[in-house]
Amino acid sequence: MGINKRVVLLIAKTTNSKTAFSQATGISTVILSHISSGRNKVSLTAVEQILKAFPNINAEWLILGQGQIFKDGLDSSLTSELFENIEEMQSELEKFKKVTEIKILKIKSSLSSITD
């Protein structure tokens, strides 16, 4: 896996969007899109920005593709599992919000009919 693909993987693993990754690192979304498409190679400046924004990223992995993604030694399968759990929890939260909003609307409607 080349460095461009590792950066794309980091976007998915750390922020889940180019916009959020751009805000965290200071790398423009245009440059990130060019990196993702392979049009641009990852510059040393971009590597520095990524490592400053995410100090838990293993520089050796980012630059050479060796070792674990994160310095804390979590292997990628455990990290992936944790990200999946977070995504599931976010999905459940969104469903809960929708159900709660519907209940609130029903209660408001009931109150309106009582007070009218």
Image: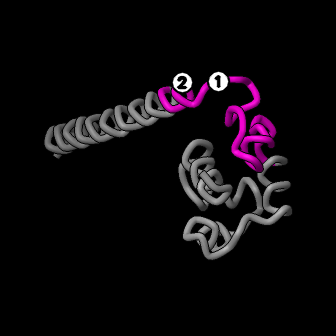
Q: Position of residue 40 (x, y in %)?
A: 68, 73
Is residue 72 within the magenta segment? Answer: yes
Q: Residues within 10 Å of mark 2 (few under 14, many from 20)?
A: few
**77 above or below 107?**
above
Label pair 2/1, CB-CB below 8 angstroms: yes
Q: Which of the pair 75/2 is nearer the observer? A: 2
Give residue 4's quadrant in the image: bottom right
Label 1: which secondary element: loop
Residue 34 appears left or right of 80: right
Point out which mark residue 63 bears.
none
Q: Which of the pair 27/46 is nearer the observer? A: 46
Label 2: which secondary element: helix
Residue beneath the point at 75% across and 47% down: 64
Residue beneath the point at 64% across and 56% down: 2
Residue beneath the point at 47% across and 27% down: 81
Report the residue marked by disc 2.
Answer: 78
Q: Identify the magenta region.
A: 53-81
Q: Amino acid at mark 2?
A: Leu
Q: Residues within 10 Å of mark 1 (few under 14, many from 20)?
A: few
Report the residue marked by disc 1.
Answer: 74
Q: Position of residue 14 (x, y in %)?
A: 62, 43
Q: Amino acid at mark 1?
A: Leu
Q: Cα distance, mark 2 to mark 1?
A: 6 Å
Is residue 109 within the magenta segment? Answer: no
